[in-house]
Amino acid sequence: MSTRPKYRANAHWYDECLKPSGKADGAYYFRSNLELRCAQELELMRRAGKIQSWAHEPCTYDFNDRGGKYKRFTTYKPDFWVQVNGDGYCIEVKGYPAPGSVTKIRRFLKHVSEHELRVYTNKGTLSAKEWLEKQKRSK
């Protein structure tokens, strides 16, 4: 029996692990294989000393100032938080933009000026502004 923690993405268990999550069964749960790949890359960067640490979905931003028809998207939880030299940034993983993704990222950029948001895709990492521009062009 392996003593290493497990990863789970799309109902598949992965034995190649990064570190325990603190969950009861010692497993990380990712919503997609792309999130898993991002976590693996972040861990490699941490081990190489390029970043200090990373965390999976550690915080939620509340955009409480919305009313009327916009009540639907009032909170936002980025997929990862990355700590670098006392500062940090958020990462949102996007394989295919779901309805509401553009809205949440726009609200983050409008209301959260103290942290940068980057979007990790299967083609690379972009700033949130670059990703939004790319979404506009693809319509």
Image (cartoon, rainbow, N blue to C red):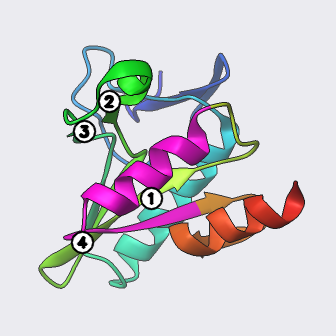
Q: Residue furthest front?
A: 68
Point out residue 115 in the picture as x, y percentages from the top left corner.
Answer: 26, 68
**Residue 43 appears at what percent x and percent y?**
43, 62
Tell me the tag on residue 88: 4
Please tell me whether residue 113 belongs to the stretch shown in magenta.
yes
Q: Are marks 3 and 2 in contact (CB under 8 Å)?
A: yes
Q: Which circle, 1 or 2, is nearer the viewer? A: 2
Identified by mark 3, the residue type is: Phe
Q: Amino acid at mark 4?
A: Gly
Q: Amino acid at mark 1?
A: Ile
Distance of label 4 from label 1 (alpha carbons) = 10 Å
**x, y percentage for residue 3?**
38, 31
Circle 3 is placed at which residue position?
63
Q: Identity of the amino acid at label 2?
A: Thr
Label whose residue precedes the other's in the sequence (1 or 2): 2
Q: Nearer the viewer, residue 84 or 49?
A: 84
Q: Which residues are magenta?
A: 100-119
User: What is the C-alpha distance between the residues marked 1 and 2?
Assistant: 19 Å
